[in-house]
Amino acid sequence: MWALLANISRGYAPILLLPLTVLIGLVGYSVESYIRPPRRKIKGKSIEEIRNERYLQEIENKTFGDSKFKPLIQDQDQENENENEWRNWRIKNSKTYDRREEELRRMNWENNRIFVDKENSNNNSYKLEVNKFGDLTHQEFSINYLIPQELNLNYSDNTSLADVEYSGELPSSWDWREYGVVTPVKDQGVCGSCYAFSATGALEGQYKLHYGELVSFSEQQVVDCSRGYGNWDCSGGWMVYVFNYWKKYGAEMSEDYPYNGELGSCTYSSIDVKIRVQAYRSIRASDSDMMNTLVSIGPVAIAIDASSKSFHFYNSGVYRDYSCSSRKFTHAMLAVGYGSWEGEDYWLVKNSWGTSWGEEGYVRIARGYNMCGILSRASYPFIPV
């Protein structure tokens, strides 16, 4: 009997083991798919380096058959010209890569150059250039430099709208730089802290106009310390939240709390506070209200929809983009004046992407259309006299 059973088991072993094999296979797949080794703690690396490594890994996982990442096929003369341009661009923008990264960055650069050349061939009132952002994908740029949509949904501003009227006829143009009211252009680096630079710019203008001294206020204090007021440190925020923070704690100067471009521990010191904000006002979304405020009050903190690729590569001229939104805000800046150029009315705006971007760090945005929402979230602080 035992011999018979042994023969049967040998004969049917594959059949008997099949369900068990399938079960083990399924369990094995499940474990392999959903259990991952713990991430190693990364020490001694900046946020930018960590993001860059993740980007490279994501790109390498993509198929190079995808046209987005497919190298361009060109003749030798064209390839030599491209190589020279690529080398000169890297030198100009102080870009260095390892061998693995350079191939990927160059593909981004070539794709962006094609986009810029195409845009510049159109009859636009502005020109683009492959600037220091030329080796980034559009997604990379948006993640590292722009305000996320979640902050738009959670925005809250309960202040009353300001009624400002200039006593007299408004001048045809205005530029607060000519009056020494604007600090030099700053660079936020790879940190979504544009809101902090916009707010400090507005406060710097008010302090100069009231006390006669042009000082640079600390953006790093805002990044490190104002999260409890609704801001998201290097992931975005709003100027009115900064003004509310300054109402309670006050603003320190950059020399006492210098900028380093990433979130750190809050080291606020009441001893180093230079000024406290009393209140703030938002401005009605009209050209006349904005012009009156600029001339009568000073530089104004503003926000726009800067999600368009053309804005990232802006170089000169009057920028207009009818595809941008007047209700979605992804970047904050500082309006310092207005004027006209070759029949184009514009707002003069200070950015925080360094002097190599745009017109020495500034952009002229078309006036008369609430272009990209420039009038919709304008505000300024009050300080004690």
Image (cartoon, rainbow, N blue to C red):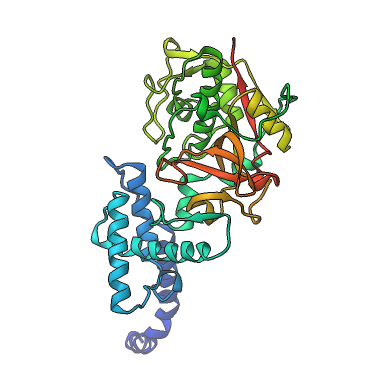
Image quadrant assignment for residue 109: bottom left
Please identify the quarter of the rendering in which residue 270 is found. top left
Q: How many marks?
A: 0
Residue 147 appearing in the image:
no
Image x and y of residue 5, in percent: 37, 85
Q: Quadrant of residue 289?
A: top right
Q: Is residue 111 above or below residue 21?
A: above
The structure residue drawn at horizontal position 57% and vertical position 49%, both measured from the top left corner, is 318
Residue 378 seen in the figure:
yes
Question: Where does the image place residue 237, in percent across and percent down from the top left?
Answer: 55, 35
Nearest to the observer: residue 28 or residue 187: 187
Compared with residue 275, is residue 341 higher up or lower down, i.e. above or below?
A: below
Residue 151: image x %, image y %?
60, 40
From the viewer's perspective, is 49 left or right of 209?
Answer: left
Left or right of 26 on screen, residue 286: right
Taking the spot 44% from the left edge, 62% from the top edge, the residue there is 112
